[in-house]
Amino acid sequence: MFCVILAKKINFYPAKRVKLTLVAGARPNFMKIAPIIRAIRQAQKQRTDLSYRLVHTGQHYDEKLSHIFFDELAIPAPDANLGVGSGSQAEQTARIMISFEKELLEHPADLVVVVGDVNSTMACTIVAKKLNTAVAHVEGGIRSFDMGMPEEINRMVTDSIADYFFTTSEVANANLLKSGVEASRIFFVGNTMIDTLVHNLHRTKQPAIWMERSLEPQRYLLLTLHRPSNVDDAERLMSLLAEIEEAAGELPVIFPAHPRTRKVLAQCGWEGKNIYLIEPLSYLEFIYLVKHCRGVVTDSGGVQEETTFLHVPCLTLRQNTERPETIALGTNVLIGDDLVLLRESIGKIIRGEWKTGAIPPLWDGKTAERIIEAMLTIPL
Ligand code: UDP
């Protein structure tokens, strides 16, 4: 593999002033951008010619999916909030593009940095490239090869026009090389989501549900579901929940549900027996529950990575994953549509018969530092 592995310090700082625009829009972006900002601020102590502007597109805008993460993860207030709000895929993407074009024309950058796979990632990449601005994609190269997922389209479009790629795995490197990206543009640096986890593990917070339900370590399961393929069809969602409830038996299942999921559950008047539906949690509260639970059932991308790092059993209710290292090395297993496998796997987790897994290479809490070191070697 010819990709640049940045495990050692590179001390080459060009004299030119470097202006970065960092884009964040939705919940999983905030965990990825927080350590990058910390690393930039660290680098600024040595060089005053590096500046950044944080743009929040407003794709997620409420307290529980946005504001709380700024407070908890000490992310500075955005320099601009485009306030695009929700809408259909096309409406939201279009609104982000219109607003971000104005933003970038008023505040030109040398490099636009996008993270993850949300609509903001793709929309801002298109805008930047059409304004002849270089783009770096943090978490580039991952692929589910599932064109039914809006995120996969965002990943493919972003990676087809971005200039530089900061990757989380060898699989991502291989995907990029296969699609014709030059090796010199790929920087295998690790996972910024894990930087945030490492940085905050010692300060997680017990959520109110812990006392309300008298939870005990290892004596509950944690559930998150928000992908359209699992939650938009009420019948499918009900059958998943019924199976989980049945398999969990005596163990309570804590379900901090995304607004999209809550809406469907409210429409069909669902009430759990031992599944406790709660509001989305803050990051520090959610990680507290991940750390202490018996196992997680999820369709989230980030949660697959966090459970692998924490050696917590994870069942992923999807047919595929863009994070195959969490299966090959980590604690994750794909369940797809197989309700029998779901039930058997929950049984295995409860009986303590699960793999402990290993942590993928470079998921060590130092990824953002490597990103900034690499970025400063890019000829901008
Ligand atoms: N998360 C959170 N509160 C919750 C559920 C998840 O803070 O109630 C965090 C989780 O720890 C992870 C991120 O949200 O860091 C994942 O976001 P999400 O599942 O929305 O997106 P995906 O990773 O699937 O793109």
Image: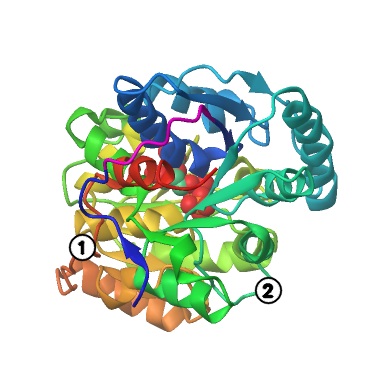
Residue indicated by mark 2: 147
Residue 208 x/y as whole percent: 33, 26
Dot 1 or dot 2, earlier in sequence: 2
**Range covered by the magenta-colored residues:** 11-18
Observer-nearest residue: 329 or 173?
173
Which residue is found at the position 71% from the left and 44% from the top?
A: 128
Residue 120 x/y as whole percent: 67, 44
Q: Quadrant of residue 375?
A: top left
Residue 321 x/y as whole percent: 47, 71
Q: Is label 2 within 8 A of ligand 1 (CB to nearest ligand atom)?
A: no
Looking at the image, residue 19 sits to the left or right of residue 125; the answer is left
Q: Is 181 rendered above or below residue 7? A: below
Q: Is 211 rendered above or below residue 366? A: above
- The amino acid type found where label 2 is placed reads Met
Residue indicated by mark 1: 359
* Residue 366 falls inside the magenta stretch: no
Element under disc 2:
loop
